[in-house]
Every structure is written in structure tokens, then in C-alpha cells.
Amino acid sequence: MTLDRLKIGKSSKIVEVRGEGALRRRLLDMGLTPNTEVMVRKMAPMGDPIEIHLRGYELTLRMDDAKKIVIEEA
């Protein structure tokens, strides 16, 4: 399952960060690393972007980027 499919208010752990080059490096630099607990806080009215909570802060991600984050299935 990927992060874009996680429902608002639900938590999960990151399993893998996909992507290549600068995009993958940027996601990892933002704290989206394996074994990190993430929770979806909000979603824009049209579904893009989403706001997630991790490591004590909020982060907004585009859905295309969220599709590259593999999480544990609930």
C-alpha cells in the first residue's frame, strides 16, 4: 500500500521510499525514511496535496510524491 491511499486520521509505518535521483533524496531529506510513523492529518478538497504528521511536525506532499512512499498495510 502507498501513502496516497492512507485515510485521514490513520497511522502507518513507512516501509520503502521509491523514486530515483533527486526526488528520492528530497523525500528522504524531509524525514520520510523507513520505519518512520506517519499519520494523514488533512487532505485538500480536490485530494491533492495531503498533509501528514511525522517526527513531530507537519509536512505537505503532492499525491504523485505520496505514491512513491510504501507503507505497511493496515
Image (spheres, grey):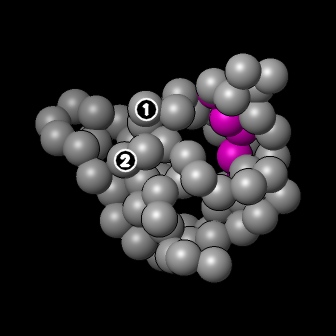
Q: Could you give the CA–CA distance between mark 2 and mark 1, rounded to whole angstroms? A: 7 Å
Disc 2 crowd, CA 10 A, few/some/many (<14, 14-19, 20+): some
Identify the mark at residue 68; answer none if there is no mark: 2
Give the structural element (helix, strand or loop) at label 2. Answer: loop
Residue 39 is left or right of residue 68, and the answer is right
Looking at the rendered structure, the kind of residue marked 1 is Asp
Looking at the rendered structure, the kind of residue marked 2 is Lys
Identify the residue at horizontal 80%, vertical 22% (top origin). Answer: 45
Give the structural element (helix, strand or loop) at label 1. Answer: helix
The magenta stretch spans residue 51 = yes
User: Can residue 33 be seen at all in this image of the molecule?
Assistant: no
User: Can residue 20 be seen at all in this image of the molecule?
Assistant: yes
Task: List the residue tagged with mark 1.
Answer: 64
Identify the residue at horizontal 27%, vertical 52% (top origin). Answer: 18
Identify the residue at horizontal 81%, vertical 39% (top origin). Answer: 42
Magenta part of the chain? 49-53
Q: Residue furthest top?
A: 46
Disc 1 crowd, CA 10 A, few/some/many (<14, 14-19, 20+): few
The magenta stretch spans residue 18 = no
Identify the residue at horizontal 43%, vertical 36% (top origin). Answer: 65
Residue in front for this viewpoint, 21 or 11: 11
On screen, residue 9 above or below 68: below
On screen, residue 58 above or below 36: above
Q: Position of residue 67 (x, y in %)?
A: 43, 45
Residue in front for this viewpoint, 20 or 73: 73
Q: Position of residue 29 (x, y in %)?
A: 40, 44
Residue 22 is left or right of residue 49, and the answer is left
Residue in front for this viewpoint, 41 or 30: 41
On screen, residue 7 above or below 29: below
Q: Are marks 2 and 1 in contact (CB under 8 Å)?
A: yes
Q: Position of residue 32 (x, y in %)?
A: 47, 53
- What predominant SS class does the magenta segment belong to? strand
